[in-house]
Amino acid sequence: MKKLFSICFVILLTAPVGLWLVDRLHANGDNTVRQGFPRPESAMWADRDYYQAVEGWFRESIPAGKSLKIFHNWLNYHLFSATETAVHIGIHGWLYPGRPIPAASPPGDARQAANGQLLKLHAVEKMITATGRRFLFTVVPGKAAIYPEYLAAGDPGIPDPFYRALLDAHGRHPMTGLVRLGPALKKAKLSGIEVYGRHSLLWTCGGAAAAAEQLLAALDSAKPASAARPTTPCPPADDDLYRLLLGQQPREKAPLAGPAAGPHAVTGPVAVVYGDHCLNRLLPFITHAFNAMTIIDATREPTFGQNVMAGNSDLVVLESGETGLDRLHLDLEALYAAASPRMRGVVARDLAMDQASPVTQCALDVTPGGLQIRSSGEAAFFRLPSVDGSTPGVFRMVKLTFPPTHQGTITVRTLPDRAGWTHRALNRETRHLIVPLPFDDSVELQINPSRHPGVFTLEKAELLSFYGKHPPPAPAVPEETVISGDIYSGMEIVTEAPPAAVPAFDAEARTVSHPTEEMPDLALTDIEAGRIFQRRGKEADIVVSGTYAGVTGPVQARVVDAGSDRVVVPWTVVDGSPENGLFTGILHQVPQGGWYRLQVRSGITPWVVKKGRNPWGVGMLVACIGQSNMREWFHTGRDHRPSPLVMLHRNGRWVTPENAGNGALAAGNRLASALRIPVGLLDYSVNGTGLTAKAEWGSGFWLDTGPGSIYRQFVDGVNTTGGAVEYVVWMQGEADAARGTVSREEYRTALERLVDDQVRADIENGSSRPQLPFLMIPLVRRPTGRDVTCQWIRDAQMDALETIEECHLAALSIDLENRGRQHLAPASYAVLGARTARTILYLLDKAAFHRGPAVADVTRASDRTIRVAIRHRGGTDFTPWSDITGFDVYAGGRRLPIAAVSRGDGRTIHIRLEDEVPQNFSVRYLYGAHPDTSNPVRDNTDLRMPLEPFLRPVPGERNGS
């Protein structure tokens, strides 16, 4: 037996080489998914990604590969009640999503988070009803809440702690529009209706019908839900949990649209319904009660805000599953902006700025523009005057208004602290912060304007009181008193002697002494080591802060070179009157460059200088986002040494780069060398992430703007650097292509939304161009991808270069070598980094071109030859001269055999066919998931720019796809 295992082990070790050799003899040549066994290289034997590629080849090439894995999971479930997936197996084979959370009393953070969410829901309800609309909110109880009896012993957890805490909070401070579905579903279960199936993730039609009865009853609808039961038999419960357990993908859910979203010939309200996949079964049972409905799919638009206020609706319905309740993102600021013009019964009162007071590490000044806050950073808080809290009859909120230039995340805590802290980074379109007030007699707001030191302004603070239909009467204005006659009649007028003159003060008659214990004592808050401030033009403003003790006097600062102590910015007063033991000010017009150090002194004791130790600079910030290929920029390859002027920023901290990451270092080094300034690369890509909700594989998707989302983590990271960047580089698409259901139009539209509605709204433009430049690296080759879906994504990305202002091609990757299933080889990342740097230099007018040649024309040159004319952008010729790969010719839906592809001259390529060239044909270059790039066309410039992909379609042809 040991010999048998040894032989098997040797076979497994030698299988990669053996299968590769066999595949070289019998390789497929159809230029589609199966491009052959991954080629082994000595440097890849210890590389996990290579073996994942081998696994992918087995799975795609051996018909039984997937079936064996499914069969293995089937045996585990049916024989051993075990699983390796994120599915919980209960009694009698019942399946539940994940492992239920123990049903201990909810921890304090769950109660606090639930209190905060309930206050937001109250605020949503009040703002919507103030516009004359109705608002309903409902939560679909989870499967374990309706069928707890099939959970295994020791695994209670019903309901979810957050949901239970929310219901507890609602019991104390109830909403008008909450519709509880739990009792109705349990009653339906007791009457014999199946609410959830044994293997289902979502509820059944029977459960949805019972919930619909409850919802329509809350609307006082005259038509029961049963009147809308489908005439065809209700489909069985889904088997998504069972498919997940077996290792299969859940069935694609239909988008929440279609007939349910159209007008209906009935007399009823016009509704906007926002919800998740639970709506799929619910909608058929409620649409008959409405004149028209607009359905908003929360899985595709994860933020509830101004989108629900579009049109003239009568009703807004918010639905959420129990397990997604804590992730429900309610954008109060966007909702207020949309609702405020139509709100009635709301009384606004300004809060007195002169009654604000410091709490910790800040100083306040009332100015004509508002309350100026000199803040030391994260620990600095000030308080507004106390206000009345919310009551059962009057809900209250505070609206804080900041200038458009405000940078950083604002933190607000309410005392008593029952609902947690509010954290909000304002964007270009939102200057307000809405803070719902808890149900207390008196509430105090303490505010931190930013986690970074600086001088900030709170322009206005207003208390908004929602009285509903019965606002308090306006206070009566007293009638003006009419005075006639001599007001001094009958009064004795006494003339008083003028006061004695005060002797003039002789400044030289008194010498002011400063005892040692009163001498100014400064402590500088040093700038984070390696920090790079985003330049504005060729300079930046730097915040200077620290603590101050002793006799008060002006504080001066200067900037010196970190290596030579050469003065870069001379002594300048940054704070003329420190207060509360704190000095804060701005040192303007620090020139680009580095590395620098900061120094401060008191104007009273200029000989005492406090010197910062940390080096920092003023330069360029480039944000890098996307998925794994972008992340590998920073990790794959060790062929470059980092320039002393290059820094990385990840997880909110500045990091000195090592020699890992060919892509990042190739780009950073070239930029630093060409511009002679510090360059900061912001590493905020996340493996396996999609752009759209359809491409959610468990790691998040970039259109999700909710708290904790990958996009929000990226924006928070940018805010820690100052809130502005000069360029954004995007390298993504694999997740959306792999899903196979994201169309070209959907991806392009989603990309436009990401750039225009998110990135450019949340991140300040640090460049000198009209819009923040968005640089695109289109989808890489995918050896295990599908031609059509990969081409959809790649075409959409190229489309976006035309439809999005200041969207530029950063670099092409399709001609570069892959390593494994989808990642590039180390040398390929280095080439990609150099090409991206060239694009940035081109946009700065430091380079003459940044793109390679393009196909200009395709013509029939002879009976068997097609002539392809190319247009150069930077070069004058190209290679190779013969055996060019990557071209395909199609006619009549059939791929035509090519005899040879060769160079005609420096601007011409000849494609010679084995047969005669038909009258109608199409030519494409580098098409599909994994085109043949063994000998691609590249120009003769220093970076050997590739010929860009091309497709010459014929009307009515599908071009072989």
Image (tube, rainbow, N blue to C red):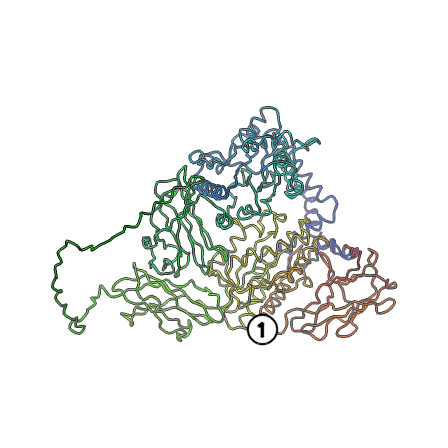
Which of 135/740 is in front? Answer: 135
Residue 915 % position (x, y): 88, 63
Considering only vertical position in the picture, is 4 above or below 552? above
> Left of 925 or right of it: where is 725?
left
Q: Which of the pair 246/624 is nearer the observer?
A: 624
Residue bearing the label numbered 1: 845
Q: Is residue 82 visible?
A: no
Identify the image quadrant of residue 486: bottom left
Q: Quadrant of residue 945?
A: bottom right
Pick out the residue farthest to the top: 191
Residue at x-position 82% and y-position 55%:
893
Picture quarter with the N terminus: top right
Q: Looking at the picture, how far across and down is residue 590, in whole percent?
A: 43, 71
Q: Residue at x 71, y 32 (%)?
A: 232
Residue at the image point whose x is 61% and y is 48% from the top: 693
Residue 575 visible? The answer is yes
Which image quadrant for residue 108? top left
Disc 1 residue crowd, few under 14, some 14–19, many 20+, Cα 10 Å = few
Residue 742, position in %: x, y? 67, 50
Q: Residue 23 vs residue 914: left or right?
A: left
x then y, percent, for residue 493: 13, 58
Q: For the residue marked with disc 1, what is the amino acid?
A: Asp
